[in-house]
Image (spheres, rainbow, N blue to C red):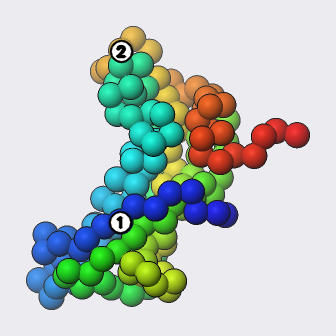
Amino acid sequence: MATIFRLPRLLSWGDCDPAGIIFYPTYYRWMDAASWTLLARCGWPAQRMREEHLAVPLVDSQCAFMSSPTFGDECEVRTSVARWGRSSFTLQHEFFLLGQDEPLARGTEARVWCRYEAGPGSPLRSMPIPAALREAMGEPPAA
């Protein structure tokens, strides 16, 4: 899997536990931020998603922790597509100290491409992921 997106993060005090090391939910916030920033850079910013009544609900997530950055560390989230489905995709996020190649943690998010049936607040229905989004996120063309 090739990294398709990199998001720098500075570990602030609010991201740490009282010992000054990363508080584990921070990784989940960073995964969410990387996913939404990636979608925006691929042409589907949050405003467009709202206007077109689209959503990408999270249906599964996990994270394995290997090492802990500390307050003030400059980190980077490296994101790649781990799996494509008809209407779902899984993103893999790896976390590194900036300039390092030993991962701090690895996580995944499985999301489903959906549209609200009758606008926001109505039931969601999955739909095929647009070809333009697949292309922007690096899916190879179908053979």
Q: Which residue is nearer to you in this view: 10 or 16?
A: 10
Disc 1: CA contacts within 10 A as few (<14), some (14-19) or many (>=20): some
The residues tagged by marks 1 and 2 sit, at their Cα atoms, a distance apart of 34 Å
Q: Which residue is nearer to you in this view: 20 or 24?
A: 20
Name the residue beneath numbered marker 2: 119
Percent position of residue 43, x then y: 48, 34
Residue at 24 percent across and 85 percent down: it is 70
Lower position in the chain sequence, tag 1 or tag 2: 1
Quadrant where the image shows the N terminus: bottom right
Q: Which residue is nearer to you in this view: 124 or 134?
A: 134
Left/right placement of residue 68 relative to residue 66 reads left
Percent position of residue 38, x then y: 46, 48
Residue 25 in view in this figure:
yes
* In the depicted structure, whether residue 12 falls above or below residue 33: below
Residue at 59 percent across and 46 percent down: it is 137
For badge 1, the amino acid type reads Pro
Percent position of residue 79, x then y: 51, 60
Q: What is the residue that sits farthest to the top in this orientation?
A: 118
For badge 2, the amino acid type reads Gly
- Residues at circles 1 and 2 in contact by the CB criterion of under 8 Å: no
Disc 2: CA contacts within 10 A as few (<14), some (14-19) or many (>=20): some
Q: What is the residue that sits farthest to the right in this orientation?
A: 143
Q: Quadrant of residue 7?
A: bottom left
Residue at 30 percent across and 77 percent down: it is 74
Residue at 35 percent across and 19 percent down: it is 51
Left/right placement of residue 99 relative to residue 1 reads left
Say what secondary structure mark 1 lies in. strand
Quadrant where the image shows the C terminus: top right
Percent position of residue 41, x then y: 45, 42
Image disc number at residue 8: 1
Count of labels in the image: 2
